[in-house]
Image (cartoon, rainbow, N blue to C red):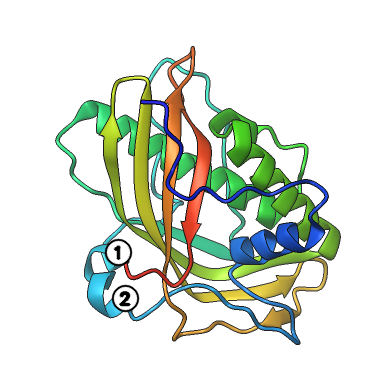
Amino acid sequence: MNRRPRHAHRRTTTALATVAAAALLLTACGDDADDHSTGPDQSQAQNGDAANDAPDSDTVAPPVDDIDRPDIEVGDSLQLVFEEPDTGSPEHDAILTDSQWQIKSVFEVLTSHDLENSSVSFYTTGESYRQDMEALEFLVSEGRTSAGEMRFYNHRVVSSDGSVAFAEYCRDFSRVVGLHFETGEVRSEATPEAKPTYYEVRMQRNEIGVWQTTDTDIEESSSKC
């Protein structure tokens, strides 16, 4: 079970335009002139009931285990809301929990601009780590951050063999605005009609038992959501 997510997007460190596009996808906003908002949705009408009942990132505690995990705090300006599926499988629960914390680790850096933070590397490795850090470095250099409410739903494990797993989820950032980090000035407004983005991730269980995200496939404005 060593395949990568389907149609995985590859980015090189020299492809600045591609890095910028990935970074803007992360913030769910475009520049003032471009306004490339890529989020969702009408999915709130279709999928919002479960997400509306989901606890936010401030109320979800880290997993209870023997692993020495980093403390992760996303800035107060950005609320991450996760649907909490009842998988009935302890392994699937562990995979989805670590996937959630991987997402939170990225947005912790986005809202703090602390590139020395080690939480991203705790939950992310390989190609996904390189892509995430390239995007974050670009956003920090541009003085960008995000605020508002971002929802994650349809989070499920597609397959797992005990050491490698594939998971998927949808992200709704139709209520997210882009801000200037230093001044708090709004750089781009929320886009209520924005459509959801679909993610497929490959995860691998490391030697201490953490399910790290290794590869990420992204489909914007996806019909899968």
Which circle marks residue 51 in the picture? 1
Q: Position of residue 151 (x, y in %)?
A: 41, 64
Q: Position of residue 118 (x, y in %)?
A: 68, 32
- Residue in the image at 76% along x and 79% along y: 185
Q: Position of residue 152 (x, y in %)?
A: 39, 59
The answer to the question of whether label 2 and label 1 lie on touching residues, with beta carbons closer than 8 A, is yes
SS category of the residue bearing label 1: helix
Location of residue 28 with respect to 123 vertically, above or below = below
- How crowded pointer 1 is (Cα within 10 Å; few <14, some 14-19, many 20+) is rated as some
- Name the quadrant of the C terminus: bottom left
Location of residue 169 with respect to 203 vertically, above or below = below
- Residue in the image at 38% along x and 60% along y: 170
Residue farthest toward the left in the current orientation of the protein: 88
| Residue type beneath disc 2 | Gln
Location of residue 26 with respect to 184 vertically, above or below = above
Which circle marks residue 44 in the picture? 2
| Residue type beneath disc 1 | Ala
**Position of residue 27 in the picture relative to residue 184 (left or right):** left
**Position of residue 120 in the picture relative to residue 40 (left or right):** right
- How crowded pointer 2 is (Cα within 10 Å; few <14, some 14-19, many 20+) is rated as some
Question: Which of the two discs, 2 and 1, labels the residue nearer the N terminus?
Answer: 2
Q: Quadrant of residue 95?
A: top left
Q: Nearer the viewer, residue 67 or 87?
A: 87
**Position of residue 122 in the picture relative to residue 213 (left or right):** right
Q: Nearer the viewer, residue 220 or 207?
A: 220
Q: Nearer the viewer, residue 18 or 86?
A: 18
